[in-house]
Structure formats: C-alpha cells, structure tokens
Amino acid sequence: MGNDSVSGPREPPVRGIESRHGAIVVVLAGELDLYNAGEIRAALAEAIASSPRRVVIDLAEVEFVDSTALGVLVEARSQLGPDGFRLAAPQLGTRRALQVSGLDRHLPVHDTVDAALEG
C-alpha cells in the first residue's frame, strides 16, 4: 500500500470560502497540485467574481504545493492587483516553495489570516 496519496481518495483542496469584513477568505488544505488545480482555480474565480476588497488564501492546512498550484495563485493575484490578494499562514514546506520559486517577492505572505485581512 505505502503512502501513495494518488491511489487513495483525496480530500478536496478547497475546504471553505467565507466572507469577512468585505474580504473573501479561501481555505485550502492537503496537497495542491496538477490534479486539483482546476478546483482551486474555480474557487478563486468564484471569489474574485464577487468583487471583494481582498482575497486571502488560508494555507495553514496545506501540506504540499506544486508549480501548477502556485501558477493558479499567481493567476488570481494578477486579476486582483497587488493589494487585493494575500496568502496567510503557510506551513514551512509551502513557505519554502514560495521562496525557492521567488514568488514570495510577488505574493504577499502573512503569518495569520487576521494579519492578512488588516491594512
């Protein structure tokens, strides 16, 4: 059996979307990759369509993120502008992926959702 997560049932990557103080918080979890990037893209498109003041992506429960999923985040940010899109609470692995790819310089990263909602 092993831990091949692709063979077993996978949890959906989008765990929740909530409106807070004129912003939309999108909660992602598990492994974000090529196989579920479409679901993530659809959820972000839906969030953006409601014209929020800001979209915050809660990454606290994300265990892995690949280049395809990172591309989806960059795409969303390009639609919202520099202050309209923020990442929150990435775990060490996710933070490292953002740093290695150089995306941490383009995607604002905050330690908590509350910090990302402020300002």
Image (tube, rainbow, N blue to C red):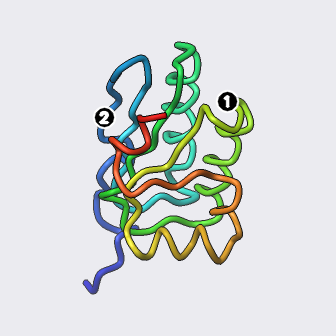
Q: Quadrant of the N terminus?
A: bottom left
Q: Which residue is mark 2?
A: 16
Left or right: 105 in relation to 60:
right
Kindly identify the amino acid type of the residue bearing the numbered disc 2: Gly
Q: Which residue is mark 1?
A: 80
Label disc, if present, on residue 55 of the rendered structure = none
Say what secondary structure mark 1 lies in: helix
Mark 2 → mark 1, Cα distance in angstroms = 20 Å
Say what secondary structure mark 2 lies in: strand
**Position of residue 118 measured from the top left corner of the image (x, y, whole percent):** 42, 35
Identify which residue, 112 or 8, lies in the foreground. Answer: 112
Residue 15 lies in quadrant: top left
Q: Residue at x 44, y 42 (%)?
A: 116
Specify the farthest residue to the bottom.
2
Number of marks present in the image shown: 2
Q: Residue at x 38, y 58 (%)?
A: 111
**Position of residue 40 measured from the top left corner of the image (x, y, whole percent):** 51, 41
